Image: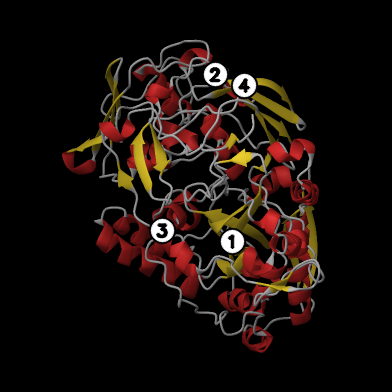
Amino acid sequence: MKPIRTRTVRAVVVAIAAGSLALTGCSDSNGKNTKDDSKSKEDAKAQSKPVAYGDAQASNGPAEAVAGAKSGGTINVYQQSDLSHMDPGQIYVSDAGQFANLIHRGLTNFQEDDKGNLTVVGDVATDSGKASDGGKTWTYTLKDDIKDEDGNVITSADVRHTIERQYSKVIFDGPTYVQSWLSGSDYRKALPDGPYKGKHLPDSVLETPDAKTVVFHFKAAQPDLPQALAMAGYAIVPEKQDTKAKYDKAPAALGPYKISEYKAGKSLKLVKNDQWDEKTDSVRHQYVDGYDFTNTIDQESQTKRLIADQGEAKNAIQFTDSVAPTQLSAVIGDPDAKKRTIQGYQVYVWGLTFNLDSAKMKDKKIRDAITYAIPNQSMVQADGGRYGGEVAGGLLAPTLPGFDPKYDPFGKLKKPNGDPAKAKELLKEAGFKQGTKLSYAYSNTPRGQAQMVIIKDALNKLGFDVQAKEIDRATFYEQVGKLKNPYDLYMTGWGQDWPSPSTVITPVYDGDLVADGAPNYSHIDDPKVNALIKKAVTEKPEQAAKTWEEAHHRIVEDTNPQAPVYYSKQMQLFGSNIGGGRFSTESSYIDINDVFLKKP
């Protein structure tokens, strides 16, 4: 979901010892043993089914009704911090992506059934897209009478404007897939000012022959385009409404809700958008009258309020935060609270990223030694034990098609708390000098602080002198995303943008994408990896899967720019008056499209 810089993974409150849950089981608040029903890799496999592409019929609204749904009332949303962005072009992280489904619409979107199966359908477009010329050309026809919140009809000019503004420096945080596919990795040179000075991409690249038709022309086949366009980052920004940088604070809605009040860092209120027509939308509902976001409630407080389930908390949900690990046992041991949870594997993998531009990180034996030394299980424990994550063997999540559960080149499944002896052996071979200083950057979130303590302790025991450098959560990925950042290593999390290894390996490990603000945080530029990426993106799915696997193995075993640490899981709470609460395969959070109030 998430910079992406990364899709910013949920921040959590942690207790490294007393508050964490054992991997083999847990106890409730009274000390009684409770059943371990945390999600397994089999559950993750069920989440990794191939995505289908829907036709015009599948794209017609209204969305299928949620059983028992009622209309009316306001849902309270608990968040511990403000949304990262509201401008679609800047959205590439989880909280903003979840929010986007309430107010934004794109050419396509993901439709999810009650079993978590995903279909790409037309959102503003009539279908998921029509490919020609071997997949190099994609044509979209717009639905009739899609309007923004002020009643302006959306035309192909708005779609063109949406794509072209992402070439400008106004946009610096969003996805780059479509721009790169259209104009290459240095796409900004093709339209440096975006559409703001009257220039446009040529028709040979992006064509709008009439008000209802948009045609994308690529140099190579792009079979994943419908999924890329379903990302929140490509949602429509109407040309008449675009206020450039200011748009991030006051975007115009096309979805079922619009912003009525926003107090930066504090609160956000959404009300119904009367210009949204359910007949045009096969994904979203407009059951409640609105949403009241409070962006100042930490996870401990969120969890306590929702366990107590009193007053306004009955109508509340966790948005992208999770149950606090210190209170997981209380939730799991309380039947009433437990039935008000959603669980599932997230698409994220946490890894310790090595800055390959740092002189101290140049020697692969040093990187391998650190990888062996990491106590992965301790990191999992600090994030909720088995309910919060699982020790990672590689850098691809269990939610990806073709995931290999046995892949474990650093032996983490056998020695989940690390192998210090092996680490010291490698350091000796590398001529390591005791007392070598390492600069470790971490986010000033509870999770980031807990990770720092564990990493610092493990590496200090090897003989390093770890200098912990705290960075504000709001700018963490911006800081570590700088090419000339002063840090040697840092923890980062990444999740697939859709169910394909291409959305992990390409943005994070492609040497052609090393740049300020890009998610290649390690600055890896391996010619063989680059060549495998170029090969895979031109192949049919079956052959591409083998090439992506080869690239993955090359990255983990032969280059090691990032030590795999753990796969992330999700558990969220909601109030007793919330109906339609279910885990979304697409978002890894509560399905925001289906919720309602049982008693409005």
At x 43%, y 30%, the residue is 106
Helix, strand or loop at label 4? It is strand
User: Left or right of 432: which side holds 214?
Assistant: left
- For the residues labelled 2 and 4, the Cα–Cα distance comes to 6 Å
- Identify the residue at image location x=34%, y=62%: 532
Is 205 situated left or right of 475 in this image?
A: left
Q: How packed is label 1: few (under 14 Cα within 10 Å), some, or many (20 or more)? A: many
Q: Is residue 481 visible?
A: yes
Q: Position of residue 109 (x, y in %)?
A: 41, 36
Q: CA distance from mark 3 to mark 4?
A: 34 Å
User: Which of the two marks, 1 or 4, is nearer to us in this view?
Assistant: 4
Q: Which residue is mark 3?
A: 48
Label 3, secondary structure: give it.
Answer: loop
Nearer the camera: disc 2 or disc 3: 2
The amino acid type of the residue labelled 2 equals Asn
Q: Amino acid at mark 3?
A: Ser
Label 3 near label 2: C-beta < 8 Å? no
Say which mark, if any, is on residue 271: 4
List the residue tagged with mark 1: 568
Mark 4 surroundings: few (<14), some (14-19) or many (≥20) residues within 10 A = some
